[in-house]
Amino acid sequence: MSNLLSQPLKVINVGIESFGDGIRASGGQSVQVQWRPPAPISAQARDKIRAHADRITAANAEALDKLQQGKPVLKGMGVALDVIPGMKKELFLHAGPPITWDRMCGPMRGAMIGAVLYEGYADTPEVAEKQLADGKYGFAPCHEHSSVGPMAGVVSASMPVFIIENESFGNRAFCTQNEGLGKVLRYGAYSPDVIKRLKWMEQTLYPALKAAIELSGGIDLKSIIAQALHMGDEVHNRNRAGTSLFLRALVPSLVRAVEDRQVAAEVIEFINGNDHFFLNLSMPACKASLDAARGIEGSSMVVAMARNGTDFGIQLAGTGDVWFIGPALVPDALFFAGYSKDDANPDIGDSAITETGGLGGFAIAAAPAIVQFVGGSAGDALNYTLEMYEIAVGENEMYRIPALDFRGTPTGIDAVKVVEKGITPFIDTGVAHKNAGVGQVGAGVVSAPPEPFVKAVEGLAATLVEF
Amino acid sequence: MSNLLSQPLKVINVGIESFGDGIRASGGQSVQVQWRPPAPISAQARDKIRAHADRITAANAEALDKLQQGKPVLKGMGVALDVIPGMKKELFLHAGPPITWDRMCGPMRGAMIGAVLYEGYADTPEVAEKQLADGKYGFAPCHEHSSVGPMAGVVSASMPVFIIENESFGNRAFCTQNEGLGKVLRYGAYSPDVIKRLKWMEQTLYPALKAAIELSGGIDLKSIIAQALHMGDEVHNRNRAGTSLFLRALVPSLVRAVEDRQVAAEVIEFINGNDHFFLNLSMPACKASLDAARGIEGSSMVVAMARNGTDFGIQLAGTGDVWFIGPALVPDALFFAGYSKDDANPDIGDSAITETGGLGGFAIAAAPAIVQFVGGSAGDALNYTLEMYEIAVGENEMYRIPALDFRGTPTGIDAVKVVEKGITPFIDTGVAHKNAGVGQVGAGVVSAPPEPFVKAVEGLAATLVEF
């Protein structure tokens, strides 16, 4: 025993966190088990879930298997109006669950104004805003049109999108090209330089990438994501490796497909200047994989987690197209100079599709740099991932974490486990200014709110009468 | 106490390793302290070293400071004969300390034969070998011509080389372009396809890269290495991130500089197909940085560690151009199908310049994938790096390891500590077949032999009379 006490301590602390602080302060390691009392669900729902536990387990195994089988490949590009199912002129897709103009947060309103200007439906932000407020346009979640969008996630008819096909099941997912950081549409900025960049992306970037992707014969995104996890990315808030590997895969075809060398160089420099370029490929890769796991009766596996900056919504494999909603929370973040948490909009974007697919916050042990910038250590990063195994259906067969001896990432969020254990998904995220027109103000981490999971489990319980 | 025993164990084991096996087998963690009795140095040398301990410490601090200040930048390319100091026709540079034909190992002889054929001095391997055996050509260590070469490290007059400048001190280092894996010159292969590839590298790859590098204005290798350590590389045996980041930095200039798009695409594909391409840049980056730390009286810091496949040689900052030699050992490795340790040549190459500069095996905590392929765990990778702090002069200010909370890598090997603690440098390495003409048979890890360090400390002691 005295020998034991002379070793570095490694302690698992349950309950009051300050017990662990003392151990850490004296140089030991302490893992905080983030135990909270189970979120309250109705006794009736709880009993039904327990009675059908075996059925739910089997359905979740089936859902996870579908997810694991997914083979997302970047097959081409097209204009939203031409390729996204149900896309129309004067329809604007957005991140998160459905929302009306009156409840939209600042950055989403800003992005809508920008998209109206981009489409040429209005000449000034004031006119655009009035049209939007007057109900001139339609709104719909990206998720309901096989799409995903980071942050505000606004997609309009003329925007070029990547086409990702899940080759195992034939379903497709779509996402716009990533604009870079700072004052960009997806963070709610709509100034003339934002619109000008979007036009360059439509007229120069898009044709070059489209030609290169087609010449390449398709780019295997699952392989790039798997490698990126071995290279310090969790492919949500850190995409430097993914962007580098994507560029390596693309550039030979780009050089061959684009006659104008100046244009090819500009395209490469644009991607080089934006380490998040790959985010708009990792997201639809997850979307395409998760959509194949929809419609499995009895499954409590989450197939979408998405925020519109006001509400946080989820969908389950076993509950069809119903959204279960709770309030979006404000992330803990590293803020850019001059900004603070007071400026931050609540959590926004479809990018939590990465966590839903076993990446992002679930794989953060692969990317300790992200935890470091909000004041955490490499050990904290490991612990966040370890905690997510508690609420996962299983472990990923392809996406693995070097620091955990190449253990598969926790994959497939089980809403029942979330509710029973009181542990909600851990999410990496960018942070938008709460006002329209400003843009990004930071990047950080946030835990999902419990409410959508409680409602989802109750919703699933309601379907169980049919068995 | 009973609470303590219910936690996961983390044990430091000194002495018999099997004590730790039991702890690991039951799911605990055990760090093995690799203590060995100090290597024997003469009592006279030991006393002198101890008497001058403060002087040596100060000299090592100065040497480490020079190393830390290094700013290696890829400035251009040239042909060996034109740019390497002292290079001549019919002179062949090689890896490691000086060696004569009769003592050269198989792969180095094979590379020499290949280089004679490449230069057109002979038409057949048989003629080339006879000329070499007859003493028709000169041999010299790369290190004595401001150069480094991986594995056999053979450089001949017509070979194109990268020019790396240490911008802080103005000194330069040189290295050939990496050929890829398998049957390649540096592993001792010399078949017609090997020579054909070298000719393509001279006539197509080189002019394109030279033009691109010049147009780029120079590529900061220190920055790429620092980032690669955050992306799963240790930039010796794993260079996937470094190669990716280098390609990102290079490609815009390449596209602009090379008129023929087919050639540009071929060049990109060649680099894409070879994740070790960056090794031939990380090595001279370390060489350029370490050469600035030479000639510091009293310093026991190692400025070169190099193997010719027969001997393992080192040089110290405080002992001028003297090589201290011991036998090269055979690495533990993952062998390609059909090969075993019986086929392996002893450790070969100048690539241990990366370990000498605080990278490679010293940074292996950044690249657990390397340890995994020889049967180790991520924890073993951490432990190897942690052990190297024991023999390092200090910690790197620029090169940092995420899994160690961005602690600087152990940097600057102190030969006195190596001898006193009986811990020799841990080195990652490729493995060549012991016979000429075969090529690579595996990749693995090896510890440096103690003899060169013992001799080096005795050599340093001999200089201390002058104080």
Image (cartoon, coloured by chain):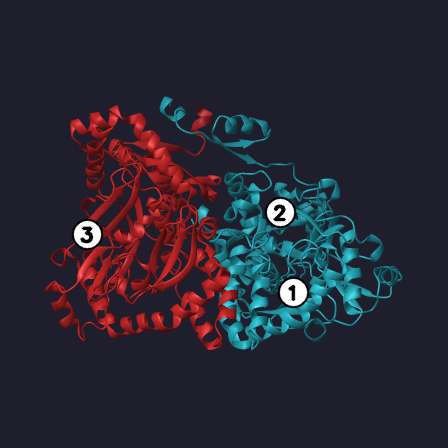
Chain colours: A red, B cyan
Q: Measured along the vertical axis of the image, is residue B180 above or below residue B458?
A: below
Give the quarter of the image for residue B187: bottom right
Real-space CA distance between mark 1 and mark 2, rounded to the nearest whole angstrom: 23 Å
Quadrant of the image containing the N terminus of chain A:
top left
Question: Do the residues marked 1 and 2 share a common chain?
Answer: yes
**Of the two numbered discs 3 and 1 in the rendering, the one whose residue sits closer to the viewer:** 3
Q: Secondary structure at mark 1?
A: strand
According to the picture, the residue beneath numbered tag 3 turns out to be: A98
The chain carrying label 3 is A
A67 versus A175 height, above or below: above
Q: Which residue is mark 1?
A: B175
Of labels 1 and 2, the one closer to you: 1
Write the residue at 25% across / 24% down.
A51
Give left or right: position of A461 versus B309.
Answer: left
For label 2, the residue is B425
Q: Quadrant of the C terminus of chain A?
A: top left
Q: Residue furthest left?
A: A134
Amino acid found under the numbered disc labelled 2: Pro
